Image (cartoon, rainbow, N blue to C red):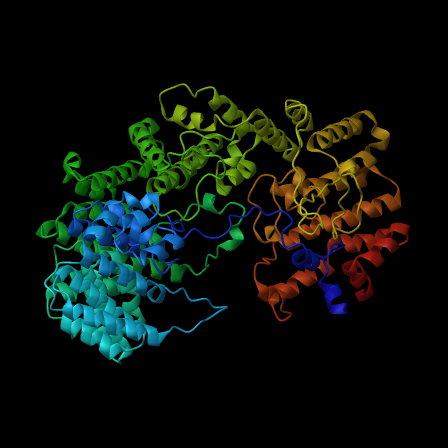
Amino acid sequence: MKTFKKLSLISSVFLITFFGEIAVNLACGGEVDPYDYYISYFHNNVQGDDYIPFAFNQMAYLNSEEDVLSESEINSNEWGKYLEVNPQDVHKVMYQIDSATNVKLRNFDGQVSSLPDSLQKNTFIQALGKNKNARKYFTFAKSTEPFANVNFDLWDPKPRDTTAMADLATAALKLTASEKDSFLKLRYAYQAERMFHYAGLHAESKNVYDQFIKTNKTTSAVKGWALALYAGSTRRLGNPEESAFLFSKVFTTNPERRIQAYKNYYYNSSSVNGTLKYAKTNDEKASIWAINGFGNPDFNIESLTRVYQYEPKSELNGALLVREVNKLEQALIKDSDLAKISYQYYFYDSDNSKSRDSIKTLNLKQLHLVKDFALKLAEENKYPQPELGTLTAAYLSWMENKDLEASGYLAKLNADKLPERLKDQYRITDLLIKAKNIKKGNPFNENDLLPSLKWLDEKRFAENKTEKNGPYVAWADQDKRFTRTTRNFYQQILAPAYLKMGDTAKAALAMVKGDLSFSQMKNNSLFDNISYASTSFWRQYLSPESMQGIANYKTKANGNDVTALLAKAINRLSKDEFYELWGTTYLRTHQYDKAVQMFAKLSPNYNYSSPTNWYADDANGKLYSNPFIQTLNDYPKKYVVAKASVTKKAFAAEMLRLQKLTISDKKNAALYFYKMANAVYQTGYFGNSWFLISYDWSSYDHASAAKFDYDIDYKKAQTAKAWYLKARTLSTNADFRAKCTFMLAKCAQKQMILNAKLNSFSYWDKKDVKYKNFINANYNNPYFKEMKLKYSKTPFYQVAAGACSYLGDFIAKK
């Protein structure tokens, strides 16, 4: 226990704070969006949609688990064509009826009147009623469904009835042999193969395929489904390399089974060379190399060049090229610090600049390889859209900060004649090139960007047609490409540029503009419709001056320039939201008279928010504070009941009163400064009233450097220190001066914590130098020396020595 006691921070217990209050009120962003975890401006569907499920995504096994074509629709279309009926009617009967009707259809005898009214006019049902052979197959297929469509239940793992499936397979095989119609014959054979396969009779399943399906002359997707079963049986019989090859064929021929084929290809764990030995055509070889490219999350120029070598006209080339570009984006485009507001502790940045330079060199080397390939694609003109190569080279040049080169590549393209997606990517790349001066923080004519920014709005609003009432963007939505591009441009390029130029107000407008992906929002609250990063920017970066700047910009929303475009973005900023935040900025700067004025503008019944108490029995429990309560220890924080709480408005008014008394009542000025110092101290990270100046609290806050203006109080307790010094100077009472000195020691200790870099668990290791230095720094706090030398006889000294382990250890050590 003594060891733990020594780890206690001065009159608070930092470790208890760390482990006991992990996050009192941390509004973190939750899980990482698998479609939005790195900055991207190069859309992953620019080459087409056929291979979108295999677009680059390190956060998910597949970018999408949904095939680009629907198996049910393909089957319905084939039946519709065969019976000359409406495919939608086929789809309804085969895939959309309820279980009770499904049971009736298993025994359908052709009497349409015996079926529910909703089906009697169905053209597919009517055709089955007239076509005896088709109806016979349909009812047989229905009889196999309970065995084919079994969902495994981990809690009730019922074994499959392999005997019944084998009997059905044998019956299907007899029907196959006797059926003359090639359409039905293929499907009977598929049912036979499938039942044998599910029964574990893989040799018999393969024989059905070889005898009846492989030789069938019908053009049908069923042949690909049957080949997938054949590939599975091949694996079960001990030849994974051939199985992988067969699945690669299904991958090529059957888009509706492409994802399944891709997964099964990798289940075989076959090497590229092992699979390639079965390939005879260039198309087969290209498919194998493509699958291996799609399955590789690392840089992989070989798969790209091999596919182009064998099938230069295939869309696979474009899909793999874009995939490599997206990898380079993740590696080379640095996320703006504005995206890390309030949760910097999630990000680790190595101090090893040599290592970073080495990695960047490797990434740039890969960029050059990809750009060379893109230019080859464009120059040889074998790929159906050679413009993709030129456009890719332009974008990669922009990534490499070669703007003139990038512009030169774009100049080779006629944007008006490009396909729509290439034209969109052209405009995005052109905007990025024009904005390069902005990103560097150089002066620029922002209105040159106005047409492109309006165009981006049109594109993202088209993606988000429904009125928004809630959080600003749906999580994990792969199709919101323009939404993310627009947000990235405003928040990663425009807002940081305004910030570098000293226009924090306009940076705040840009942050908001980047988030508002819906043209209309029902909820009349700006902060309910923007991201955590933007909300944090407003609540942490803005000063009284920048709030005044925002107020000025709000009056310019009716213009026709970029300023107006940005100003319109905050038309949902309510009066209460605006003045509550403005008043808070005045609290942070101790301009209490102006804070009172701002809070007076709030609605009469305005409800100041209080953070949630995560440890309360009541799920809706809140934390309430009174900063004017004096506390010896920081932990546990001394919160109060709701009736005793002090709002921001009341805090400002009382601090203003105390400020005035320090001038008008000089005799008691020391006491007023002491009360003000205590109150300001309580609004810091270690105090009970942190939410009077901060909008969230995290146990990680101590680990990040002081970054925002109000951190001088929130993290460093500097104003409190200055006022404690003032109070001590103005007083002649030894016991009172002892209190001031003790509180000065607490303020000094905040600097020790801030400089300790506690974001490493090695910190807690006694062998760690930082740990030893930190402990020694606390033991040798200069204000401890003053207390012992000057105030050891005071009553307060005895109380503090018993309450603070560091002071006690300091006394014992001396």
123 left or right, relative to 515: left
In this rendering, does residue 323 appear at all?
A: yes
| Front in this rendered view, residue 156 or 731 | 156
Residue 13 lies in quadrant:
bottom right
622 left or right, relative to 133: right
Residue 776 lies in quadrant:
bottom right
Q: Position of residue 784 (x, y in %)?
A: 78, 55
Name the residue located 38 percent from the left edge and 41 percent from the top edge: 488
267 left or right, relative to 660: left
| Front in this rendered view, residue 165 or 263 | 165
| Front in this rendered view, residue 333 or 625 | 625
Name the residue located 69 percent from the left edge and 48 percent from the top edge: 686
693 over 200 or under it: above or below:
above
Q: Position of residue 61 (x, y in %)?
A: 36, 61
294 over 463 or under it: above or below:
below
Name the residue located 21 percent from the left edge and 59 percent from the top edge: 254
615 over 228 or under it: above or below:
above
| Front in this rendered view, residue 494 or 44 | 44
727 left or right, relative to 115: right
Quadrant the C terminus occupies: bottom right
Name the residue located 29 percent from the left edge and 46 percent from the top edge: 43
In this rendering, does residue 396 appear at all?
A: no
Could you tell me how many numbered marks the image carries? Answer: 0
Q: Position of residue 190 (x, y in %)?
A: 22, 66
Q: Position of residue 307 (x, y in %)?
A: 16, 61
Quadrant the N terminus occupies: bottom right
